[in-house]
Amino acid sequence: MRKQTLFLTLLLLAHPLLAADSHPARTFFPDFYSDPKQIWTFPVQEQTWKNPHVWLVLGLSTASFSLDGRPAERLREDDSFRDFNEAFTSSAADIVVAVAPLALLAIGEISRDQDFRSYGWKSGEAALDGFLVVTIAKAATQRARPHEGKPCGFWEGGNSFPSGHATVVWAVAATTASHFGRHRWVPWVVYPLAGLISFSRVSSGNHFPSDVVFGSVIGFAIGRHVVQ
């Protein structure tokens, strides 16, 4: 529901601004409609597999499935994470992640600051791209949630893989770090925050580690793609 609200908010903001040729809203919807093609064809592009970083990330992501059994179960049973889970899995945490980019977008529109304007639209685009990819991936994999006791429970009618929270938060984090890359402190803030939110999805029992790892990788890739 929060993602649909974000989309409608961006639509309402864009409507009166599309007449301005230089306004980033003019490219928001064309980019949003073209992004899925580039995202889904990424695995079949020849240059993708020539990049050694792709193989490294794929190997580490695949290895995360080995953590879905007893290691993840012990983490879920650890009561020392109770306060941490309450803080990072609360609705307030979700609202902060959603509101921060919108707030900068609003500041940009009010002050006519092109940098904040561009960031606001790009972060919204990344979040919506991530939501779209996750929705399709969840429907295709239908993985059971951890509380159902099926670590390998794909095609069980669930919606665990990949983690939507991890995907969206890393998409926004990567967009933020890339867009404001001239400020060296920005990545040191947004990436650890994204990591904490993602970790909380495992420690709270909402997701398996592999759900979160794959979601984080997808989100990071989407965020970098949107900015570049």
Image (cartoon, rainbow, N blue to C red):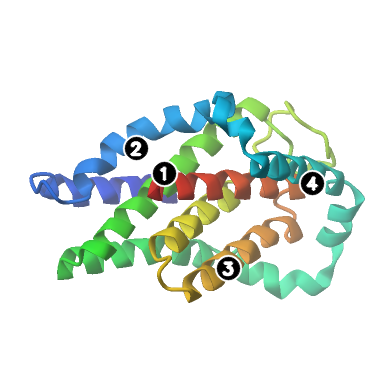
Looking at the image, residue 108 sits to the left or right of residue 85; the answer is left
Mark 2 — residue? 32
Which residue shows up at 33% across the image and 61% down it? 102
- The kind of residue tagged 2 is Phe
Cα separation between marks 3 and 1: 20 Å
Which one is nearer the viewer's eye here, 210 or 158? 210
Q: Which mark is residue 119?
A: none
16 up-or-down from 104: above or below = above
Residue located farthest toward the right when viewing the structure as drawn? 70
Which residue shows up at 53% across the image and 72% down it? 189
Which element type, helix, strand or loop, lies under badge 4? helix
For label 4, count other residues whose C-alpha is less than 10 Å away and answer few (under 14), some (14-19) or many (20+). some
- The kind of residue tagged 4 is Ser
For label 3, count other residues whose C-alpha is less than 10 Å away and answer few (under 14), some (14-19) or many (20+). some
Cα separation between marks 4 and 3: 20 Å
Mark 4 — residue? 64
- The kind of residue tagged 3 is Leu
Which element type, helix, strand or loop, lies under badge 2? helix
